[in-house]
Image: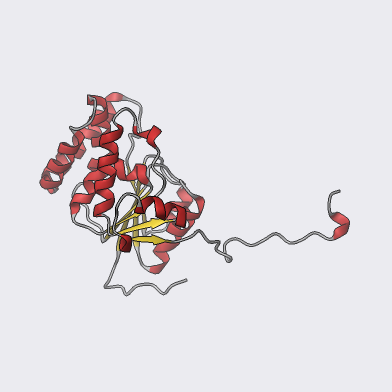
Amino acid sequence: MSNPLPGSLTFTLLVVTSSWPSDPFAAQAIKELPDTGIDVSVTCRKRPDEDWLLHPRLRWVSAQPRYNWLSVRLFRLGWLMIRAVATALGDLRLLVSHARQGRSHLESLRALYRLLPLAGRRWDLIYFNGVSAVLDYLPLFDLGRPVVINYEEFNADAAGSDLGATRESLHAALRRASVIHCASETIRQQALGLRLEPAKIRVIRPAVDHIFFSPARRRPPAFRRI
């Protein structure tokens, strides 16, 4: 385990993911980051397990309505708007402008619910865990913070009917990223096919934490099943 950062230098990280846990190995790695002195915030639809949130440096930023009652959802949305007006008017304009691009009023409201909790907040680094997270949180690229993207193969079926616009938005976001993480050389070649800067693309292959995961003890031959 790395040594904690000096107390006067608190590094802040925002992890953006569409679902949680999207990858058990990534979840474990994120859980260990606070022990190095990093403040980690995670925004996703589903609330992480309570034991995951026990660490004082781990925070969840809700991106999904917690209640089914329409009145409660509208009240929370109104409260988020008022908070943004008071503390981050520039962010509010940016987020509302993006939400208006939704194909329906319902889609625009969902975008506001997803984005408004982040208004007025800043992190030293933003990490997007997957392409779908990038498409859901495009305005975060305009906050002027370094961005790392965990790139995966683009799923055209998930883009819906507006495939061309979705591809264009994704390519624009990838070009603005500071670093693009690929899990294999095959995915790296796909990213290079998008005419991205080769220096931005890094291959970090999956590995096993031999401290957290250990192989099971072998049974004596007499106990093996035939």
Q: Does residue 179 appear anywhere in the picture?
A: yes
Coloration of the structure image: secondary structure
Image-quadrant location for residue 192 = bottom left
Q: Position of residue 49 (x, y in %)?
A: 47, 46
Q: Is residue 54 above or below residue 43?
A: below
Q: Does residue 150 appear anywhere in the picture?
A: no
Q: Is residue 214 above or below residue 4?
A: above
* Picture residue at 43% right of the left edge, 44% below the top: 20
Image-quadrant location for residue 30 = bottom left
Q: Position of residue 34 (x, y in %)?
A: 39, 63
* Picture residue at 22% right of the left edge, 50% below the top: 141
Q: Residue furthest right?
A: 222
Q: Position of residue 189 (x, y in %)?
A: 40, 54
Q: Is residue 180 above or below residue 172?
A: below
Which residue is at the front of the view, 18 or 150? 150
Image-quadrant location for residue 65 = top left
* Picture residue at 11% right of the left edge, 47% below the top: 90
Q: Position of residue 54 (x, y in %)?
A: 43, 55
Which residue is at the front of the view, 1 or 155? 155
Which residue is at the front of the view, 157 or 78? 157
* Picture residue at 22% right of the left edge, 55% below the top: 122
Q: What is the tally of numbered marks visible in this picture?
A: 0
